[in-house]
Image: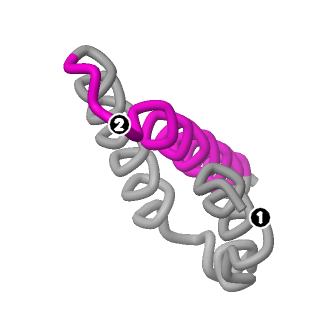
Amino acid sequence: MPSGSLSATVVVFYLPQQILDPSFMATDRIPRILSLVGLALIETGTAFKLNHLMGAETVFNVGAVVLIIGLLLWAIALLRAKR
C-alpha cells in the first residue's frame, strides 16, 4: 500500500471519536494545534518540492488534510460557541 493512502486510512479510520464529541469541542485548543501542524507540514512539503526531495507530495498532502480537519473542527467549535 502506498504511503499516501496509508496516511489517508489512518486519518479516516483511526481519527479518535473523542475529537468529534460535542463536550470535547468546547475548547479551541485541538483545532488550533491541528491547523498549525497542517500549515507546518504544507510548508515542509513545499520546501521538499523546491529542493527536489523525495516524499514532497505526501508531506504536502498530509499537511493539507490535517489543515482541513483542523479548520473544520475550529469552525464547528465557533458555531457551537455562538449558540
The residue under label 1 is 12
Q: Residue at x 74, y 79 (%)?
A: 21
Q: Residue at x 72, y 62 (%)?
A: 1
Q: Which residues are magenta?
A: 51-79
The residue under label 2 is 54
46 left or right of 2 in image: left
Residue kind at label 2, given as amino acid type = Met
Mark 2 nearby-residue class (10 Å; few <14, some 14–19, many ≥20): few
Q: Is residue 70 magenta?
A: yes
Q: Residue at x 41, y 40 (%)?
A: 55
| Mark 2 vs mark 1, CA separation in Å | 24 Å
Q: Nearer the viewer, residue 43 or 80?
A: 43
Q: Nearer the viewer, residue 42 or 82?
A: 42
> Residue 70, relative to residue 61: is it above or below?
below
Q: Main secondary structure of the magenta part?
A: helix
Q: Is residue 13 magenta?
A: no
Mark 1 nearby-residue class (10 Å; few <14, some 14–19, many ≥20): few
Q: Quadrant of residue 65?
A: top right
**Mark 2 / mark 1, whichever is N-terminal:** 1
Q: Nearer the viewer, residue 42 or 51?
A: 51
Q: Residue at x 43, y 42 (%)?
A: 59
